[in-house]
Image (cartoon, coloured by chain):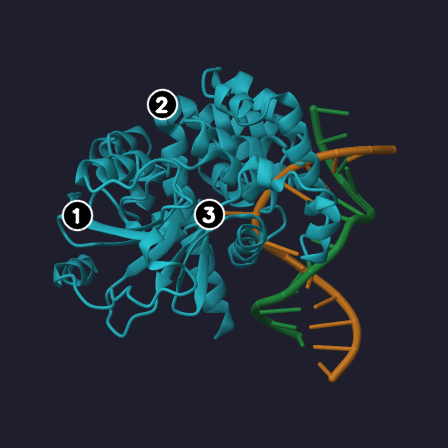
Chain colours: A cyan, B green, C orange
DNA sequence: CCGGGCCCTGAGCT
DNA sequence: AAGCTCAGGGCCC
């Protein structure tokens, strides 16, 4: 098993990166930079981290090689990312008319952005060792599931994306998020058959009849949540108000978030964990509930639904066991559980 | 505090 | 082929 993974990453990085066929943008506006940064793959599982349901903006680029290259939008730029045993390899594509500052030709600038997005200052190997020691369940799941990181995402994008996430699968959430970007965000560049757009700013979403428009785009009842959330956040002070939530304690930030329509405990915890830096937040969904009742809190097996009391209990128990980065541990456990769940489903098909 | 019904949509299964 | 169930919730009763 490990052998297969290792071989995959040893292959030299090349091919498939011909990004010359841009469309519909004056070429002088489109700028590119490429580089690589030191990052062992034991510190980062790119595929699971990017496409495991944290962010809905990354896709695997189809190439005629087994190389895994991901393309997505982050911090207002289009990025392609891949990795080998020692490095994270990137290409960043910007549009000067979208970019707020000047385009940088300094590798350090882009490296800083990547290190911040992947929170590379946190040493996963050290965390994994501690979590394995902390609980037997982690020890068993983690050995199969390596190097999932919690992305440091942009607030507005993260918040709106998770308003779309209720009663939904990753696929459809991805489509909805793409739709909102295409309709309200600035275009960065065209690539092959698709265009890439930045996630819209709060103000760009503040348009008349937003709910009606979103309903027409098949957002369903989430349309009213999004439109109400946008107006309420702007009323409270917009991006500055959101940013300020980082200064509050985790509990305070969560309470504030839950005053916004469509944000309940689960979505609030997602936002706390993924874009406010409250790394002890534990979003409890049906999968985590299943795991918790099986391995951590047996008395929960009695009840089927997640009561608010059980919700609190699960978060507290995870924080007690896994410490200040409990949300990271939870993410690994979640990904492992999701994989187990999907395998079970796939097995049933036969 | 708990349980249940409802909300929209589309994929996947029957 | 049409109908059903279900999915990584929130809200209201």
The CA distance from mark 2 to mark 1 is 32 Å
Location of mark 3 (residue):
A198
Which residue occupies the foreground of this view, A224 or A266?
A: A224
Location of mark 1 (residue):
A36
In the rendered structure, which disc, 3 or 1, sits on the residue that comes first in sequence? 1
Q: Is residue A91 visible?
A: no
Marks 2 and 1 on same chain: yes
Q: Which mark is residue A323?
A: 2
Are the residues tagged 2 and 1 within 8 Å (C-beta)? no
Which residue occupies the foreground of this view, A165 or A23?
A: A23
Which residue occupies the foreground of this view, A232 or B13?
A: A232
Which is closer to the viewer, label 2 or label 1? 1
What SS does tag 3 mark?
loop
Which is closer to the viewer, label 3 or label 1? 3
Marks 3 and 1 on same chain: yes
In the rendered structure, which disc, 2 or 3, sits on the residue that comes first in sequence? 3
Q: Is residue A128 left or right of residue A172?
A: left
User: Residue A72: image x %, image y %?
Assistant: 38, 53
């Amino acid at each position: 098993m490990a052998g297969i993974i290792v071989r995959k990453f040893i292959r030299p990085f090349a091919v498939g990166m011909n990004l010359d066929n841009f469309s519909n943008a004056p070429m002088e506006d489109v700028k590119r930079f490429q580089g690589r940064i030191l990052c062992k793959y034991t510190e980062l599982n790119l595929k699971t981290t990017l496409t495991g349901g944290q962010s809905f903006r990354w896709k695997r680029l189809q190439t005629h090689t087994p190389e895994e290259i991901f393309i997505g939008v982050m911090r207002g730029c289009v990025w392609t990312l891949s990795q080998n045993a020692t490095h994270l390899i990137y290409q960043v594509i910007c549009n000067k008319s979208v970019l707020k500052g000047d385009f940088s030709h300094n590798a350090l600038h882009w490296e800083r952005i990547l290190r911040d997005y992947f929170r590379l200052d946190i040493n996963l190997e050290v965390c994994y060792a501690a979590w394995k020691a902390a609980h037997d369940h982690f020890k068993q799941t983690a050995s199969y599931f390596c190097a999932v990181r919690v992305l440091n995402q942009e607030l507005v994008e993260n918040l709106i994306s998770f308003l779309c996430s209720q009663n939904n699968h990753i696929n459809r959430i991805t489509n909805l998020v793409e739709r909102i970007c295409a309709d309200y965000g600035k275009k960065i560049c065209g690539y092959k058959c698709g265009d890439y757009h930045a996630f819209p700013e709060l103000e760009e979403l503040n348009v008349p009849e937003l709910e009606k428009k979103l309903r027409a785009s098949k957002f369903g009842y989430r349309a009213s949540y999004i439109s109400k959330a946008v107006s309420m956040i702007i009323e409270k002070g917009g991006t500055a108000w959101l940013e300020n939530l980082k200064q509050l304690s985790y509990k305070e930030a969560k309470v504030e978030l839950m005053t916004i329509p469509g944000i309940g405990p689960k979505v609030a915890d997602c936002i706390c964990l993924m874009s406010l830096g409250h790394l002890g937040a534990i979003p409890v969904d049906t999968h985590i509930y299943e795991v918790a009742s099986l391995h951590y809190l047996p008395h929960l097996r009695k009840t089927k639904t997640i009561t608010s009391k059980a919700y609190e209990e699960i978060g507290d128990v995870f924080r007690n066991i896994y410490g200040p980065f409990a949300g990271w541990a939870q993410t690994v456990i979640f990904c492992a559980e999701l994989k187990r769940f999907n395998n079970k489903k796939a097995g049933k098909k036969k």
